[in-house]
Amino acid sequence: MKSAPTLATAFLHPAGQSLPEPFLALRKQRGAALVDMPLPTRKTENWKYSSKYLKLTEELALSLPAEGKTGSSLAVPGYKVAFLNGVLIPEASEYPDLDGIRIQSFDDMDNDEAARVAERLDSTLDNKAVQMARLNSARFEDGLLVQLRPGAVLDQPLFIVHEVTADASGSAYPRIYVDAGQNSQITLVEEYISSGTEAVMVNTVTEFSLAEGANVTSVRLNMEAENVQHIGATGVRQQRSSRFESHCVGFGGPLRRHDLQVRLEGEGAECKLNGVVVTQGKQHYDNHTSIEHVAGHCNSEETYRNIAADQSHAIFNGRIHIHQDAQKSNAEMNNKNLLLSNGAEIDTKPELEIYADDVKCAHGATIGQLDKTSLFYLVSRGIGRREANVLLTMAFINELVEQIPVEVVRETAQARLNQFFDQTFEEA
């Protein structure tokens, strides 16, 4: 009887050996843990809609070479760090030269520094729920530490551009760790792009640790091409009175998956999570979010919008867990979904798990189509049917797009959304 494939047997090949020894030791430890870990299947609850799209092959197990420079679609107005095929490219990066802010690649650390960082990796994620993050921990070839000392403020956004050059099948495993000290402040933008036509898998992990009073804004823009499978995880741990704000914009592909986990561990901590996803053709996008209210007097606000056209598939699974000691918690989750064709599918599952009695929590989810009355009204006023469709669809998500705090990202997202509309709607 043939045994079920595991992550190790299907996908764990030796990665580069240029990292400092503590990182190599961590990779070896995480790799050993994958030996008996089965690949996600339809019976894996949080992968039941996505497992059939996960294509792991021997060719994809090979890491892509990192050569040349990246080409961002953003006209970057701030600081920039460039990753190419999971490896940081110093000559394509522009670091800030500010007191109290340290930006350093894993590859450039000495063993003592690497040991301190390696000890903290994976500390923000529930690896039982985010299975594929373990693969990143076993395979990353480089990474980036962004460290802000107490009181430090980054005066402009830090753009991290992740590009994969899909000229030959392979995989990339970029890794980021952000350590925001007490009362520090940063806006971090992650852009994911690609070139080439061969099949590629990108497996990313970004972690945020927020000390007391820290203020972090994270913007994530996923715009890779049709040949790229993308599986990403973001973990966040927040201490007293800290604030984390997330804006995710995702365009579908053969497999797109993002797990976002937030732990509110100090009283008065706040988080705000916004997400917009659009899919067309036979694309697939799966968002899983989790907010853990561990301490009392914390606030969370979550709003996600999905649009699916043609025969595409979008998923939202949002979970809020109010722990027993998290009294006076205030949590709100809202997910709205728009189907643009009869062949499209959207699955939504909002979850509330509450163990405290003095809390205020609410959640809601809706799935529908464009309102025919509104469409008729616009057409009857002389607006073309295509323009009317675009106006109504853009109105559905514009509230969230307009909240993106970085102008160049907002404009880029809107331009890509216009391309989506051009391909989805035809003049009647």
Image (tube, helix red, strand yellow):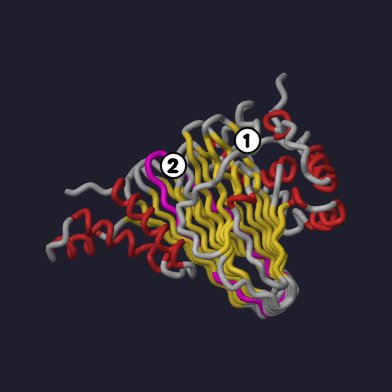
Residue at 44 percent across and 60 percent down: it is 305
Viewer can see residue 98: yes
Sequence order check, earlier mark of 1 and 2: 1
The one of 48 and 193 positioned closer to us in this rendering? 193
- Dominant secondary structure of the residues highlighted in magenta in the image: strand
Residue 314 coordinates in the image, percent (x, y): 46, 49
Amino acid at dot 2: Gln
Residue at 41 percent across and 43 percent down: it is 312
The one of 264 and 153 positioned closer to us in this rendering? 153
Residue 303 coordinates in the image, percent (x, y): 49, 66
Say which of marks 1 and 2 sits in front.
1
Label 1 sits on a secondary structure element that is loop
Contact (Cβ within 8 Å) of mark 1 with mark 2: no
Q: Is residue 258 left or right of residue 111?
A: left
Q: Which residue is mark 1?
A: 65
Q: Which residue is mark 2?
A: 283
Picture quadrant of residue 206: bottom right
Residue 311 coordinates in the image, percent (x, y): 38, 41
Residue at 83 percent across and 58 percent down: it is 116
Picture quadrant of residue 351: bottom right
Q: Residue furthest top?
A: 1
Question: What residue range appears in magenta?
Answer: 275-301
